[in-house]
Image (tube, rainbow, N blue to C red):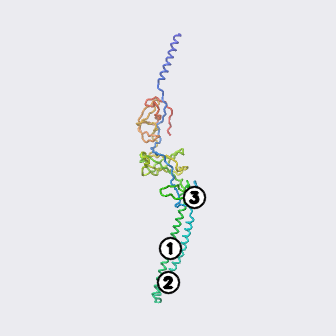
Amino acid sequence: MKTLLKILLTLLVLTAAGWGLWHASQPKPIPVNLAPVERGTVEATTANTRAGTVKACRRSHLSPATGGQVANLPVKEGDRVRAGQLLMVIWNEDLNANLHLAQSEVATARAGEKEACLRADVAKREARRMERLAKQKLVSEEQRDRASTDAKARRAACEGARATLQVRQAQVGAAQAALERTILKAPFAGVVAEVNAELGEFVTPSPPGIPTPPAVDLIDDQCLYITAPIDEVDAPAIRLGMPACVSLDAFPKPICGARVRRIAPYVLDVEKQARTVEIEVEFGNPRDGAGLIPGYSADIKVVLDHREQVLRIPTEAILEGNRVLVYQAATGTLEERRFKPGLANWRFTEVMDGLQQGEQVITSVGREGVETGALVTPETTTTIP
């Protein structure tokens, strides 16, 4: 009886050891990430190759048209100004004096013109009276001719006085223009970004070919747009009015609803091997640009095509040759499947044929051992937003 028990125990140990060796020799399931074949939105997009820039629709680097000493500087950096508001005045007392002198000369010339023309009217009436008297033989021909000549001379003096008045008025205009060259006003409403002058300092206009800092840098921050370079290969697909999204490092969420407003008609070759086309994107709602500052770096994504409620899979699940690995839940193995792709971007690819809704594809295709027929176990299932 004891011998039989020993034999049974030995067989039990050998069976357990054999089962353990067999189990240890079996391949272990590989943990994988899955994503369902679902319906959703797929967009074909293109993006800038280098960082774009937030720019103001209007920005002026302002300096007075003439040099001189700053006599009045009523604004400072950060001030918001209206169109036509005074920004800077160069010392101009001499020009003011010239203007007042010219205006006084206009008044004198106007009085002289009035006097000359009144005398011309009197001489004209006298010439007409002499003409009537001459017809009645009451005055001599000489008296009539003298009156007629005097009337013509007086008329010429009147015309001369009027011409002198016009000259004096033109001098007033010239004096006013010279005075205006010393006064700097805001050409549009905006915010003063920079002031490169101090009260009492001398400022000079930039010589030709030698850029100097502007006296006042004025920005219209109520109207902003994005300019960015697009690779020359992608540029032909872009059209005016196409929707776009703008992403900025300073803000967590992209701003969509923008539109392409300009496509440069030439290619930039700043880098010989990376030629680009400059495009401009404007916000669909001006409030979308609230809080942005000109000069921010920005990326744009232009939507070339858009389809909704189509079968799609994550683009990261696709292998070379439009192949995917489909998870077979019944056996826990992988099956390779070819499919026909449609619209695609870096996130999603449209499925035209070859996959069914509800099937699951492998997204962790780079893991060791993940191949056709491999035994796998789902680690996570990606929910496609």
- How far apart are labels 3 and 1 at the CA level? 40 Å
- Are the two marked residues, 3 and 1, in contact with CB atoms closer than 8 angstroms? no
Left-right relation of 103 to 352: right
Q: Residues within 10 Å of mark 1 (few under 14, many from 20)?
A: some
Image coordinates for residue 104, horizontal then vertical, percent: 56, 71
The numbered mark, 3 or 1, whose residue comes first in the sequence reads 1
* Visible residue check, residue 271: yes
Q: In the rendering, at what x and y percent does residue 22 appear?
A: 47, 21
Residue 359 x, y percent position in the rendering: 46, 35
* Callout 3 crowding tier (Cα within 10 Å): few <14, some 14–19, many ≥20: few
Kind of residue sitting beneath label 3: Glu
Amino acid beneath label 1: Thr
Q: Residue at x 47, y 84 (%)?
A: 146
Name the residue tied to disc 2.
Answer: 126
Give the label on residue 164, or none: 1
Residue marked by disc 3:
201
Q: Nearer the viewer, residue 177 or 374?
A: 177
Residue 83 shows in the view:
no
Between marks 2 and 1 in the image, the one whose residue lies nearer the viewer = 1
- The numbered mark at residue 316 is none
- Look at 57% across and 58% down and name the residue there: 201
Residue contact at pointers 2 and 3, CB within 8 angstroms: no
- Distance, label 2 to label 3, CA atoms, is 65 Å
For marks 2 and 1, the one nearer the N-term is 2
State whether residue 364 is above or below residue 270.
above
User: Residue 381, relative to residue 207: is it above or below?
Assistant: above
